Image: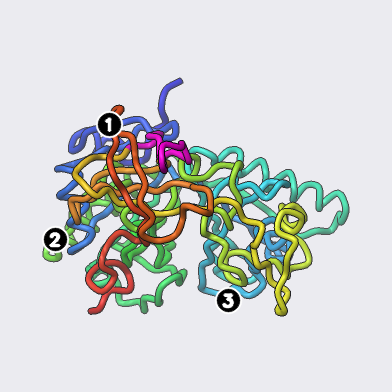
């Protein structure tokens, strides 16, 4: 099957090294992974993320219905705000992670990952259609506009300065949604991203026939505006090392339906997942799995047996996905994501391990090409948060 192409595929093919990812042909790098990684950490980088799924939901019943689909309490999401959450199956397993962007009470843009996009869509629409059978006058409409649009991620500490140079409109704080014009082009934007840095995800919508010409104009305009700020075009390689360095899991690799949000250390109760809601898909299974509650009615998770952790090699090496992890000669797990950090030069990884091995500074062994490499459990993100990341000291 031929890989799909983003609207600015021709630009990528001319300037970058192409690779296949999630059924799409995408640039792996334009200069080098390290250079692009450091551009985002120190200045800014721009990624073509048009392969990610983009759905639009409209109608007065949008939020009551999406609130049943997602574990986050979307009824608390204000106009002009975005919310990170997950799609869960009936067993509480993670189908995907996602962002809901609220323009107003009857208009939502929903962004998910590329690989599970079709399954995500079918999962959501099946639930909505079942709800419509129960209530015939339900007012909710939906459209997958992924192929009618392009989406760029402008990331890094200087991303806001670049955007400010392109628009006079007010730019919201983190996790804000707004609409503006860039280079004369109408865009929908959010102050979100998946690199651990401040930044924006910028979407332009057209038609399948016109999106390529409009998208390339916008892409080149952002690159031109970013030149004084050290902006570089970035590929999948840097995107992967950046999200790993930020301690951000990858759908289908770090998590699957075999794991729930609490095991993935993504269950910040009352924010990403609200167990006090009347109903969301997977809630019953999670309540049966973790039945213990505290005085506030929240799960204490005493029954949890495994959890996602960060790992750092204690000597030079490269931990890769699938490498075995041992403790005292016993196999206890495997690396889900791993690489050399372009920032620190250390081998870093994530894994899901039995709870007894997840305490900070626990020493383990990662087998790299049949050779034991000592490692220890560390906090993520894998960088000094006073110097890097969206919460850095300015």
Q: Is residue 152 magenta?
A: no
Badge 3 crowding class, 10 Å Cα cut-off, few under 14, some 14 to 19, many 20 or more, is: some
Residue at left offset 56%, top offset 75% = 79
Q: Are marks 3 and 1 in contact (CB under 8 Å)?
A: no
What residue is pinned by disc 1?
371
Span colored in magenta? 320-334
Q: Is residue 203 left or right of residue 346?
A: right
Q: Which mark is residue 230?
A: 2
Horizontal and vertical percent for residue 371?
27, 31
Label 3 vs label 1: CA separation? 52 Å
Kindly report which numbered mark, 3 or 1, lies closer to the viewer in this rendering.
1
| Residue with the mark numbered 3 | 78
First in sequence: mark 1 or mark 2?
2
Image location of residue 313, percent across then percent down:
27, 48
Question: As displayed, is residue 31 above or below residue 43?
Answer: above
| Nearest to the observer: residue 8 or residue 291 | 291
Q: Position of residue 385 (x, y in %)?
A: 29, 70
Helix, strand or loop at mark 3: loop
Q: For the residues carrying marks 1 and 2, which lies nearer the camera in this image?
A: 1
Q: Residue at x 58, y 76 (%)?
A: 78
């Amino acid at each position: 099957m031929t890989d799909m192409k983003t609207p600015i595929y021709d630009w990528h093919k001319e300037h970058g090294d192409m690779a296949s990812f999630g059924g799409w042909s995408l640039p792996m790098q334009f200069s080098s992974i390290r250079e692009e990684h450091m551009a985002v950490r120190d200045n800014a980088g721009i990624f073509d993320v048009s392969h990610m799924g983009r759905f639009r939901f409209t109608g007065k019943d949008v939020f009551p219905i999406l609130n049943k689909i997602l574990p986050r309490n979307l009824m608390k999401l204000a106009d002009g705000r975005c919310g990170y959450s997950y799609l869960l199956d009936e067993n509480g397993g993670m189908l995907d992670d996602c962002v809901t962007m609220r323009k107003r009470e009857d208009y939502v843009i929903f962004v998910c990952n590329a690989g599970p996009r079709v399954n995500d869509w079918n999962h959501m629409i099946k639930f909505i259609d079942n709800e419509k059978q129960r209530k015939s006058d339900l007012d909710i409409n939906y459209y997958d506009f992924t192929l009618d649009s392009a989406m760029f991620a402008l990331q890094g500490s200087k991303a806001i300065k670049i955007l400010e140079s392109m628009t006079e409109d007010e730019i919201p704080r983190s996790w804000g949604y707004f609409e503006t014009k860039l280079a004369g082009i109408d865009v929908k934007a959010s102050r979100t991203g998946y690199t651990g840095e401040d930044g924006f995800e910028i979407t332009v919508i057209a038609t399948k026939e016109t999106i390529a010409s409009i998208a390339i104009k916008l892409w080149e305009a952002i690159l031109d505006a970013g030149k004084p700020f050290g902006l570089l075009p970035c590929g999948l390689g840097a995107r992967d090392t950046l999200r790993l360095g930020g301690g951000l899991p990858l759908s289908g690799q770090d998590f699957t339906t075999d794991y729930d949000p609490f095991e993935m250390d993504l269950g910040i109760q009352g924010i990403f997942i609200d167990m006090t809601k009347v109903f969301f898909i997977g809630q019953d299974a999670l309540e049966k799995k973790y039945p213990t509650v505290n005085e506030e009615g929240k799960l204490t998770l005493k029954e949890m047996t495994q959890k996602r952790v960060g790992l750092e090699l204690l000597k030079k090496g490269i931990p890769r996905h699938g490498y075995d992890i041992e403790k005292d000669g016993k196999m206890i797990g495997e690396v889900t994501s791993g690489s050399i950090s372009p920032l620190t030069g250390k081998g870093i990884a994530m894994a899901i391990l039995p709870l007894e091995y997840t305490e900070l500074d626990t020493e383990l062994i990662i087998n790299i090409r049949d050779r034991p490499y000592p490692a220890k459990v560390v906090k993520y993100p894998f960088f000094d948060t006073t110097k890097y990341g969206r919460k850095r000291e300015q």
